[in-house]
Amino acid sequence: MIDMIEVFDRAEVGPLISETDYYMKRYVPKLSEVIARHSVKWDKETIINTDDDLTDRVFQAAVDLLAEAGAYCPETNRVMQFTREEILVACSQAPKSATFGEDRERKTMYGRRPDTTDDRPWVHVGGGIYTTDEQIFMDTVEKMASFDIVDSVSVPSILHLRGKDARVRSPQEILAACKTVRLAREGIRRSGRAGLPIINGISAASQPASMFAASYPAFGLRPSDGFLIDFLSEMVVGYEALQKVAFYNSISANIGSTSTPLFGGYAGGAEGVAVTATCYMIMGNLIFRGTYHYNAPLHSKLHLSSTKPLIWAIAMSNAAIGRNMGYPMVNLPYLGGGSGTKQYHYEMACYLLAIVTSGGNVFSGHPAMSVQSDSLVPDDHKFHAEIGLAAAKMTRAEAEPLAQKLFPLFGDKLKDPDKGMTFQEVYDAKTKRIVNSEYQKAMDNVRSDLADMGLEVPVS
Amino acid sequence: MGNEATYEQLKQSIVDQDEDAVLEAVNKALAEGVDPRDVINNGLLPGLNVIGEQFECEDIFLPELMQAALAFQAAMTVLEPKIKEAGGAEQKKGTIVIGTVKGDLHSIGKNILKLLFETSGFEVHDLGIDVDLFKFIDKANEVNADIIAISALLTTTLIGQRDVIDALKDQGTRDKYKVIVGGGATTKEWADSIGADGWSGSAYDAVVLAGKLVS
């Protein structure tokens, strides 16, 4: 695989082009071309694809897209070009596993193939949702980390200092990022699982300076945690991302290449998102030198991941990489339903059935499109992890009819989702036990509904 | 009356997102003596309305929207001089200054909204991403804008939307403009809390909102 500095050089030597021309003359037409060339088509009904030939064509289309459109570096206004051979070598040499955590909690996440029913997928919970109160932040992290089935956590963001929000790029943001890390590590220690990894480093940092500052070892993050580096806009590889690549490779840390292809944006519809999401995983390894991928396609208008075409596209990208590359993946869903709502649970069940059977690992998701503060309720995430583990015993063909039964239970609500609860509304402040009977009842009802449909979800 | 076939050809060429066909239809209409303002109002804008509806229904996506907008812009380069020659003025719904707040480098949502504004008959001045708050205000002053539209995706950049409104208040020009906010991390509650004139969760709804605000 071409080395890191050679990759950086590609941002300095490729063809000069404006961003608009890159999209309208390279990415968009090439995406249409490779979709047609490889006959990638969604039938507008299927949620979980089972056609392996189609899956492999999506992968080939993704390789062609990168080889023919390249990536775009806005700082140099140049296309980063890679030959087809360079791309295929990178795919063949991509990591098949990533090891996280320390001591007793040190474990390995594997890239999974679709229809694998005899393994235990990696279980990741949490999310970077904004938390308003430091005590709730600590309690949230401690409770998530305390669940035995959990292998890693994403921690919320705490973005204020002395009661004021930290502005992006401000010195306060650096302090908030450092504080987030310190409190998160302490919350994890309090759970009794000190070595448990945080793999959404660093949720409160929007700029490299904040990430690097918060990575100072004394604050508690370690190379065995996971650090996210994202593609800012479709196919865009900015200098800030490459700065992070330079730094986190230099300390040999786990890198989570992260992408959010937008349904309805430059990527277009289901087919374009499937191909682009797959392409990002290839780019994540080749350009970001990632050890795992954070796949988070999103609907550009609804700001969630649980529409039928999106679930199809996300599952497809997992299957395409699982069959052809083996790169470890987690998928971050954004759901419409708020915490504790039946809608949220149904959305997650449908999503996890699709993703886990298609080769993804288990990852709980953001409720309420991730815009409601204090909406990270740990028991939601435990329940969803349990659903994910139950789904891992199924094949795609077995999961598809269940997903079809689940979708009507929330599909019509996506434009006006059910409002949910906050951490404070669910738990007793002292004991951290669930005291909201409505919350517990909704979860019990959904567990029962899933069992009736044929998906037994044991309580862990 | 009598120009229905011409208007239909103009409309269809926009719906087809075919720039060459649009220019051909425009030139044909002008050669037939059709008033350039009628070319816009009865031919091109109805086509753009169809494009907007198709985008809302997810029959087409951003690339097709951009192609239609580019075709419309190409037509306007032909039509605007003709309108000025005739001593008229182009009819527009209003003037909007749009951008993503300082510190925020996200552009796609803002770009979609810009295109929808343009294809709905607004004059749009796009300041891009990472925009200094006074650039919003200076540009709004310069072009005598009706609306300032401010996008922010990140929780840490939301504050930039409030800054623009606060600066307008400090300058005593808050009432001169309608300020609308949007973006991934925004909510109606946030918009209300900072005193914005409107918020929208989707680009299409934002166009409807802008229409109401300038009516």
Image (cartoon, coloured by chain):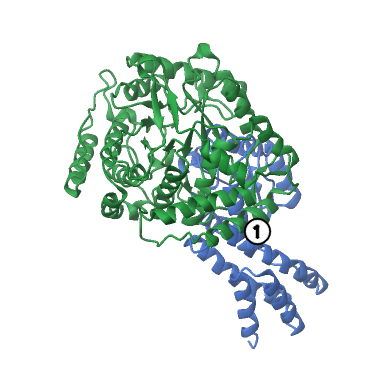
- What is the three-letter code of the residue carrying label 1? Gly
x, y percentage for residue A213? 58, 18
The C terminus of chain B, quarter of image = bottom right
Farthest-out residue, bottom: B2
Report which colour depicts chain A.
green
| Residue nearest the viewer, comparing A138 with A264 | A264
| Residue nearest the viewer, comparing A396 with A25 | A396
Farthest-out residue, right: B85
Q: Chain of mark 1?
A: B
The N terminus of chain B, quarter of image = bottom right
The answer to whether A23 appears left or right of B88 in the picture is left
x, y percentage for residue A233? 59, 44
> Within the image, what quadrant is residue B213 found in?
bottom right
Relative to A77, is B122 above or below? below
x, y percentage for residue A308? 38, 54
Q: Which residue is at a point 56% across and 66% down the rendered structure image?
A: B51
Q: Which residue is at a point 48% across and 56% down the rendered structure image?
A: A271
x, y percentage for residue B83? 77, 71
The answer to whether A393 appears left or right of A332 in the picture is left
The image shows a total of numbered marks equal to: 1
As helix, strand or loop, the secondary structure at mark 1 comes to loop
Which residue bears the numbered disc 1? Answer: B94
| Residue nearest the viewer, comparing A429 with A309 | A309
> Within the image, what quadrant is residue A404 found in?
bottom left
> Within the image, what quadrant is residue B4 found in?
bottom right
The answer to whether A46 appears left or right of A438 in the picture is right
The answer to whether B19 appears left or right of A332 in the picture is right
Q: Which residue is at a point 38% across and 17% down the rendered structure image?
A: A187
Which chain does blue denote in the image?
Answer: B
The answer to whether residue A169 of the structure is visible from this angle is no
Farthest-out residue, top: A218
The answer to whether residue B59 of the structure is visible from this angle is yes
